[in-house]
Image: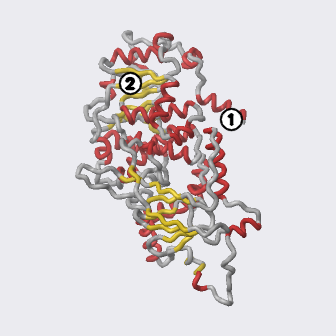
Amino acid sequence: KLAIEMNLKLRRQGVRNTLQLGPNAYTEAIKTLLLGKIVEGSRREILEKMREMLSKSEYTTTMRETGEVRVAYNQSRITKEFPLNLKSRKMDLFKFSNVTHWQKIEKMEIDKKIEHQTGKRKKPKNNGLIKASANLFTENEDQSGERASQQPAILNVQAENVSAKDEDGSWREMAPGETFPVGANVRIDMSGTGKNSIKLSAVIAAKEKDKGDEPSKAHIPDQSGLREDLKAERGTISNERDVIKDLLSPLDPIPKLFHMTWKDKNIMKNFPNNKYVQSLNYMMKMNPGWKLTISDDADVEQYLKDFLSEEDYLLLKPQPFIQKLDLWRLVKIFKEGGFYQDMDRMYNIPMSEIIRKDSIRCVLPSYYDVNIAHSVMICAKGSPFHKLAIEMNLELRRQGVTNTLQLGPHTYTEAIKTLLLGKVVEGNRRDILDRIREMLAKSEYTSTMRETGEVRVAYNKSRITKEFPLNLKSKKRDLFEFSNVTHWQKLEEMENKIK
């Protein structure tokens, strides 16, 4: 039941990845009901916990399948009464029925996408050769010089009718994403595939993770969108721990940096009588010592190109510009820290009243009772909330998600919720937001509030004064029309009509 619900929810979010929707969602559903969503340990350790629970219960049974021994099949039990033609192959069945394996179809689609985005046709593989690669990332050394525990290596195999033998001596049919521990000797046997008999032996080796710990530079094994190092960093949520202190106390204070983005960098000079532009001028007058940087479209594009891996940038490049802005603001705060606010939000409250204590490292208001406000971000450099939101955004893109709200506000709120409460939380949206707000309000490292139309974290309509007047007759659309900007929701409506 839960697997069906999770499958359908992922589809509504735009996920199209077959493994994510199928085996991964099914296993995740069982794990969630038995152990909870957040469980410490490697994938193998988690499976062992589940198998132990299943074997002890009088209501369930389980076993570890291999290539030769499965729940309903054992190769040693082939008899004269029930003989099997072992010379026949899976590919014979597929060819006879004119069926193409789903993994082959998906690979062809991916190759077409890459060719379309890069203009380069992928070179064909050498006939009869297996291309296998181990993608493994380890933690950096800590201060004592000790290394953190290593993740399993991932062996990507693209060939049919291939079996592998690992160090425990068992043979099994290979599939993309098969995992082996570091140091395992893996032999891949292609005999009987209609090609020359080929055997490859390989030792799985570790590959260092990119330095600097920038989340976009590393491959992310499928763990429901979370990297293992982030999962370890988050730890197990417990009422006995001050989760926010653990997350934010190592960070430096919030730097005095204002980050804004608009098509016209000189908007403050070119359109001074609009209330949103007036707000920018007041923001600078109220906060001496703070620096304002307005980034235009080209700046945003280059900033993301420099930060992202080539593969992730190619996925993002053809998307609507609003999606680039949504990711840019996360990256900007994560890499530099400071204050970000959408251009169409007003400002008339000094930063000294927003960051009320020296200990505060993040200000996280909610937008009514809908989500954590995504149009304003105030955090220290290296914010784990923004780090995880970047990871989740990129992972959803790799899975084919293109919905703007899902990739932006929803993912940002989900990242904060995951770090504070865990992935699976009982209660409706308002109950969950109330719990998050309560935690943020109690911590010395965070502050929060419930934003409305007239009262926001950096603006209060009742505080408009003669010293800082605002032209309330001016409209948002005036600003957009002056700069020849179309609101992203209007653009999406137009695209949907065309579709």
Q: Quadrant of residue 436?
A: top left
* 10 Å crowding of disc 2: few (<14), some (14-19), many (20+): some
Front-most of residues 370 and 298: 298
* 10 Å crowding of disc 1: few (<14), some (14-19), many (20+): few
Sequence-earlier tag: 2 or 1: 2
Any mark on residue 258, and which? 2
Q: Amino acid at mark 1?
A: Asn
Q: Quadrant of the C terminus?
A: top right
Identified at 30% across, 24% down, the residue is: 352
Compared with 293, 151 (above or below) is below
Front-most of residues 117 and 420: 117
Front-most of residues 384 and 464: 384
Front-most of residues 163 and 225: 163
- Residue 428 drawn at (x, y percent): 49, 48
Farthest-out residue, left: 144
Compared with 383, 428 (above or below) is below
Q: Quadrant of the N terminus?
A: bottom right
Q: Amino acid at mark 2?
A: Phe
**Colour mode of the rendering:** secondary structure
Q: Is residue 343 visible?
A: no
Dot 1 falls on a residue whose secondary structure is helix
Q: Quadrant of residue 498?
A: top right
| Residue labelled with disc 1 | 496
- Residue 318 drawn at (x, y percent): 60, 35
Dot 2 falls on a residue whose secondary structure is strand
Identified at 43% across, 51% down, the residue is: 227
Left or right side of 199 for 352:
left
Q: Is residue 386 visible?
A: yes
- Total numbered circles: 2
- Residue 472 drawn at (x, y percent): 49, 14
